[in-house]
Image: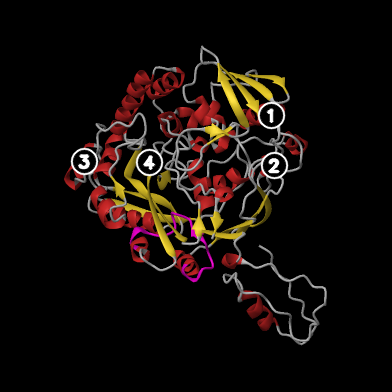
Amino acid sequence: MKRKSILFKVMAMTLILLLALTGCNKYNQETTTTPAEGKKEEKNETPAEPQGSGNPEVFNFATNQDIPHLDPHGTAANTSFRVTYMLYDRLVTYDGTDTEVKPQLAEKWDVSDDGLTYTFYLNKEAKFHDGTPVTAEAVQYSFTRAIDIGKSAAGQFKKVISKDSFEIVDDHTIKITLEKPFAPFIKTLGTVFANIVNPKLAENHGDDLGESYLADKGYGSGPYILESWDRGQKIVLKANENYWGEVPKLKTVNIMIVNEPSTARLMLEKGEVDLLDYSMLSPDVMKQMEGTEGIDVITQPGYQIDDIAINMEKKPLDNVKVRQALAHAVNYDSINNDILLGAGKRIGGIIPEGMFGYNPDVKQYDFDLDKAKALLEEAGLGDGFETEILISENNEVRKNIAVMMQSDFKKIGVDLKIKTLAWPTFLETVTSGGHQLALAAWTPDYADPDYNLWYFAHSTSKGPGFNLAFYENSKVDQLLEEGRKTVDEGRREEIYKEIQAVMSEEVPYIFPAQRLVQATQRSWVKGYEINPMNTWYVPFQKMTKE
């Protein structure tokens, strides 16, 4: 969004007046600034571009979660994904509410009979933002870079592909040969981790393969280009007018960081914001807004699961009886009925109901404070102990869940401290193991149990790989690796159900709820679809304002 500069030629203007004039436009994007008194308008001055919701080509999206960085191969933050999905393309993609992959950069692909070799035929019209073509070389560069960085994206491909897996047939044809069969391989290529990066990034690799350079830049071929980023305030995306696919109708997308949900709600009601991040408003506020003129409340099934990671490397949380005691001290029914107001339901593991591999028979811990006390006694902690739970700021639901846990934990002698952190700090803290308990949420990028369980349970995913419980079980590792290479779907289902059963006994995580997804938007917004996997993904490139 453009900001008009105000030049004051009257030297006596005070600093207080300057601040007042600057502050008046902070949220009211429909207001335009008039020339200061005494400033002569030039006759050929271009009229100001209409701003905010008054312009069908400008879209204002509000979220209260900041963005750590924009390297698609180095971050596991959903807030970053929202932007990188717009800046980059993938070989295949997910579209709308569907959980099956669709062609994107790859127009088609072949798979060998043994399930090891995939041949991709690239769209010859696709170009990066600088005009260079998207080639097979770019695909090879992107995947090998992800492997070399060894962070979030590498978890998708670990022990599946290597630097020797690629054969460039011609500029627009590439073969990828897997080291062993990997059943969900095509599904993984529709995720943000498989974004194709312009190989020209190599000119700025430095000492970290360009991670620091790419942290605040875009090097993709996607429908939007990063125009500006005022950290903690706003990211501005501009439509890629030379996009090889359909050029977006929304020419400017302002992703605005609005810390207070009440402020964001007011902005939506006044028409200054077109859509709110689905996680901003609590269920009770959503109910209040139902039926409000000019506002739609969208409700869709989702694969999002609220999770409490228990850092098993911290004492006394390394004791399974302690973890089981905490699981018995969480009031799941009250969370789902009183906090989520029916927009959530019990879940026993990280595989959501509705996804292949879901285990409906997994052990669920009842809210039983007597049982919790007895387990603490068995663990030698009858007098209780002190621990801490981290939550991200500006999330009322998580705060309410944490406060409820604090009250119930106190009844079993556990003094639960609540620590609130800004999202980037929260993410950095939990991935480095600086937490005891951490309350967050998880949505899969593709509809296969490998995705959720590999990140939450495989020992190689500890920390930056998003195994925030720092959980390690050799049997679980073995089962996960078998599940990746087994093409028999019946056997895969058995494997994933068994893993969930093992984890339910060891309690590296507590799962309060599987959520329905609710979002609020202005009625003039068209084309916003919520994918049950990528609930935080907003398809700006397909949306319009009417």
Callout 1: SS: helix
At mark 4, the secondary structure is strand
Q: Which numbered disc flags the more N-terminal residue, 3 or 2?
A: 2
Which residue type carries mark 4?
Answer: Ile
- Residue named by callout 2: 219
- Is tag 4's residue or tag 1's residue first in the polypeptide sequence? 1
Tag in front: 3 or 2: 2
- Residue 141, label in figure: 1
**In the foreground, 324 or 401:** 401
In the rendered image, the residue lying farthest to the front is 546
The tag earlier along the polypeptide, 2 or 1, is 1
Relative to 71, residue 194 above or below: above
On the rendered structure, is 8 left or right of 177? right
Question: SS of the residue at dot 3?
Answer: helix
Residue at mark 4 to residue at mark 2: CA–CA distance: 37 Å
Checking the image for residue 310, the label placed there is 4
Question: Mark 3 or mark 4: which comes first in sequence?
Answer: 4
Give the amino acid type for the residue marked by disc 3 in the picture: Glu
Based on the displayed image, in which of its 4 quarters is residue 193 positioned? top right
Categorize mark 1 by other alpha carbons within 10 Å: few (<14), some (14-19), many (20+): many
| Cα distance between the residues tagged 4 and 1 | 37 Å
> Which image quarter is the N terminus in?
bottom right
Q: Main secondary structure of the magenta part?
A: loop
In front of the other: 170 or 337: 170
Nearest-to-viewer mark from 4 and 2: 2
